[in-house]
Image: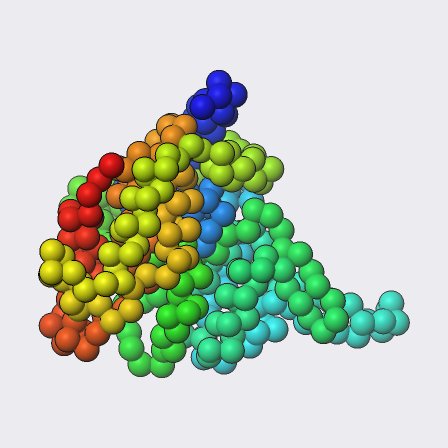
Amino acid sequence: MSKALKKEVKKYNEILKKIKQEIAKVVVGQERIINALLRGIIADGHVLVEGVPGIAKTLIVRALGKVSGCEVKRIQFTVDLLPTDILGLTIYSKKLGKFIFVKGPIFANFVIADEINRAPPKTQSALLEAMQEKQVTIGRHTFQLPLPFFVMATQNPIETAGVNPLPEAQIDRFLFKIYMYYPNQAEEEKIMKHNITLKKFEEYNLRTVTSPKQIIEMQKVVKKIYISKEVEKYIVRIVRATRTKNKAIPLTKYIEYGASPRASIGLFIGSKAEALLNGSDHVTPQHVKNVAFDVLRHRIILNYAGQAEGIKTDKIIEEILNKVPVP
């Protein structure tokens, strides 16, 4: 590992700490979620968040946008939302005497796709394709999305009426899936005391501590983080353990389909981002374990027996991590 890399890691780790300090002014607790979102941003991925309404999902991304100098747009997904409502459309300008493209809300650095499972499949696909390609094609013209480009999509787990669950192939495009829970007693008392939801966002006077350009640099540094051959093999062993029924790992009998090769890529880049977040210039097996749940939970599909018995994918992942030999 070069001294230059260590210097870069130290520099960007300090910036990430400042980002978290600023967000703490407006968001009480939820450190695990903030870390996961930061990890998703610097790994150049996208994050799917599942949680009940009113637990600061949108607030966290707004705060992230403010402190990083990035533009934030929010799209409220509904049953009648069209792809053009997200991507934009071509209209005829009488003034200019020609057709012009009006950009949709997806043209932002950070996009909040609220309740993505409410939209029809065609609209969901339009967003997910743009996420993958980082560009939008309208007719014969292609438009690049601004960089860095990060999508946080949210799902409400308690509603089933009028929703279109994301197909497994689409969910696989999210680097992480994270569960967001209610605050604890002390945190909720603090939220109530500070009246956070009724206060104007601008009143918090959050400082901008980084820039879109620096975030792109961070993404480059993440790719440079060292990962040994042993840890690479460890990642592949974990992913392959989700694909075969193993008597040594009893819960694997409830898996219908295991994680795809995208999971190996996700663990590889996700653990590098976790290393940078922790100020390390190399990946350890613990960094891999730290991101394993977020990377794998939406990529393991249970069979009928698993669904009938209410088996949670997190329990299967926990058992795999306990049984797969650590280098």
The correct choice, above or below, for 60 with respect to 127 in the image is above
Residue 56 visible, this orientation: no
Q: Is residue 135 left or right of residue 238?
A: right
Colour scheme: rainbow
Q: Position of residue 164 (x, y in %)?
A: 38, 78
Q: Is residue 89 left or right of residue 299?
A: right
Outermost top residue: 3
Q: Position of residue 112 (x, y in %)?
A: 47, 58
Q: Position of residue 203 (x, y in %)?
A: 45, 41
Taking the spot 50% from the left edge, 59% from the top edge, the residue there is: 74
Taking the spot 23% from the left edge, 63% from the top edge, the residue there is: 244
Residue 173 visible, this orientation: yes
The correct choice, above or below, for 139 with respect to 233 in the image is below
Taking the spot 24% from the left edge, 56% from the top edge, the residue there is: 241
- Image quadrant containing the N terminus: top left
Q: Position of residue 139 (x, y in %)?
A: 72, 73
Residue 162 found in image quarter = bottom left
Between residue 285 and residue 45, name the one nearer to us: 285
Q: Is residue 250 left or right of residue 243?
A: left
Residue 254 found in image quarter = bottom left
The correct choice, above or below, for 245 with respect to 119 in the image is above
Between residue 160 and residue 205, name the one nearer to us: 160
Taking the spot 52% from the left edge, 21% from the top edge, the residue there is: 4
The number of discs equals 0
- Image quadrant containing the C terminus: top left
